[in-house]
Each structure stands twice: as structure tokens, then as C-alpha cells.
Amino acid sequence: MSLKIWRIIAPSIVALWLLNACADEGEVPDVSHIPVKLTLVRLEEEIARISSQEEAKQFLDKYPAFANTFLFRHRWGDDAVPISDMLRLGQSQYIDTLVMEAKAYFGDMADIRRELEQAFRMLKYYYPEFREPVIYTIVTGYSNDLTLTDSAIFIGLDYFMGTASRYHSPDPHYIFKHYRKELVVPAIILMLSANYNQINQSNQTMLNQMITYGKAYEFTSRILPHVPDSLIIRYTAKEIEDCYDNQHIIWAHFVKNNLFFETSLIAAKRYIEQRPHTFEIGDECPGRVGTWLGWQIVRAYMKNHPEITLQQLMAERDVQKIFETSGYRPPEQ
């Protein structure tokens, strides 16, 4: 489908959707009474001061959660932590600049702290057993953006500076361009959603992947009710507007090509995984559009079944049930 027929719906449809979204804000629960304790530990300057193997070892001994999780286990696949890598990071020619840029860009992170505290209150509202993890910040030299464990969250600040830094991530530009400070909290909550998102692992259909992502995005939207969709799904404002403008085209493409029950890896790469655009639908159709459509189906399901709680949604493994009873159809032209 060519670019010429990708943008054909009047912007008034998006305006109507935005009005409906504002109307739902009264349903946001009051969580001001729920206590939270947020611990934020800044590690970037401490790492930049490492100048010997002994100092690297002392740092790793001091922060074992970081040593075993954030940088090294992803790289080595076991508990062995090479001190030389820690020293190499501390002595990197870029580390001082990245630390200074992170300090200037993020400041004291009071805004992120407030957002996380409110998000954790919402999480405790829906899941009282939730316990606040310790938040660690670091500059990694673009080796990792975000890692979660049962008790800790590690934020690679250099990734979330995006284009504000003179250095750039090795990721393709269409991925890296979305990183910025406003994305930190939505990205954390999206990752935390995996702790509650029940999945039917035996279902290999595209629909199962679409609904799984849709549940994760809906979870994030409920925990962060005032955060725009674009930050939750990591689209630009134009990309999210294009999706809402042209959802009848997206829907028709999936129906015509029987994509919901497709099981091929090629299909997943086209509609679920990272790409600059979904060229099969339109030259400006953003990548991962299958996950966006899955979100719309989940939203319709929740709107059509107001008795369903967020907890019940996240526990639901029957994606066929969600799909068939959602009643989702794109708005009429």
C-alpha cells in the first residue's frame, strides 16, 4: 500500500478519541493514601572513578546485584563477573563525558522519582503484594538500557538521553530516536508488566503475540493513566496519530491476509518486531503495528466488559476469547 493512501482519514477522528480518553480520567483510582518507599542509588559517578582492578572489585563487592545482573550476566551467561570489564568501563574515554551529560540532562531526577512513586502506588493498589525495588542509575557506555530483577531496577541513563548526548547508541536510528527522559518510567512499568502477564506459551499464533503485547500496554496505561500512548508504545506523536487515523487500513490488511492465526517467524518479523516501517501496509505505517493493533483489541475487550478487572485481564491466557468478545472494529469512515 502506497504512502498516498496511508493518510486518508480526517484528524477529527483522533480528536474524538482524545475527548473520549479525557472522559475516562474520572475512573482513575485515588491512591494518595498508599505508602511507598522509593530508594534511588546513583552509581554513574562512582563507576567513573574506578581506576584499578582493586577498585573495580570493591565496587562489584559493594553492589552484588549490579555485578550479577546489569552488565555481565547478559554478556557471559553465568555468575562469573570479569573485573577487567568493570575496569574498562570506568576507564573508558567516553565515561566522563557521558556522566556529565547525564547529570545535566537528568538533574536530581526528582521528576522521575515522583512519577515512580505514583506508579508504585498504583501497582500496590492493583497488586498489594508488590514491593518497591531499589532503583539504580548508571552510565553503561550503551551496553544496556534497562534491567529488572525481583528486587532491583537498573537504568542505563546514557540510553535514555537519546539524541541529547553527543554519543549515540549502536542501535538503529529508528529505535534510538525514541529514547528520552520521559520514556524512563513507562519503560520500567512495561517491563514490570511481565511479572503479571500470563501467557499461553503453546500458542504460536500472531494473535497470541499481539494480545500479549496489548495486555502489557494496557497494564502500563492503567498504572500510568496520564501518560500518552506514544510513550507507552514508544512511537512518535505522528506515528501514533497515523495509527489511529488509519486503523481501518491496518485492520483490513490483517483480515485480508489472515494474519491473526499466522504462525511463521517471517510474519512476526514484519508486524511484531522492530522495523522502521511496516511497508506491507504503508510507507509511513510504523513498525510493530501488530502490537498496536493488539492493544486496540485489548482496549475494546476491557470497554466491552467493564466487569473485568486489570488483574483478571493479566491472568487471562485465552487470547481467542479476548479477540472474539472484544467487539473491536475500526471506527466507521
Image (cartoon, rainbow, N blue to C red):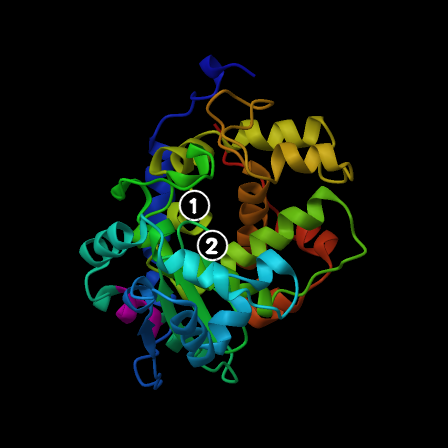
Classify 233 as above or below 46: above
Q: Quadrant of residue 25?
A: bottom left
Q: Nearer the viewer, residue 113 or 147?
A: 147
Amino acid type for the residue under numbered disc 2: Asn
Give the vertical position of 178 relative to 144 (above or below): above
Label 1 crowding class (10 Å Cα cut-off): few <14, some 14-19, many 20+? some
Q: Residue reaching furthest right? A: 202
Name the residue nearer the viewer: 300 or 281. 281
Q: Position of residue 139 (x, y in %)?
A: 35, 58
Check residue 57 for magenta coloring. Answer: no
What residue is shown at x 34% (from left), y 69% (from top)? 116
Magenta span: chief secondary structure: helix
Query: What's drawn in magenta, residue-wise?
Result: 112-118
Q: Is residue 110 left or right of residue 147?
A: left
> Label 1 belongs to which residue?
234
Q: Mark 2 and 1 residues: CB-CB less than 8 Å, in contact?
A: no
Which residue is depicted at the point 46% across and 59% down?
Answer: 146
Inspect the image, locate mark 1, and give the three-letter code of the amino acid beneath it. Answer: Arg
Residue positioned 37% across, 61% down in the render? 185
Residue denoted by label 2: 144
For the residue pair 45 and 227, the one nearer the viewer reads as: 45
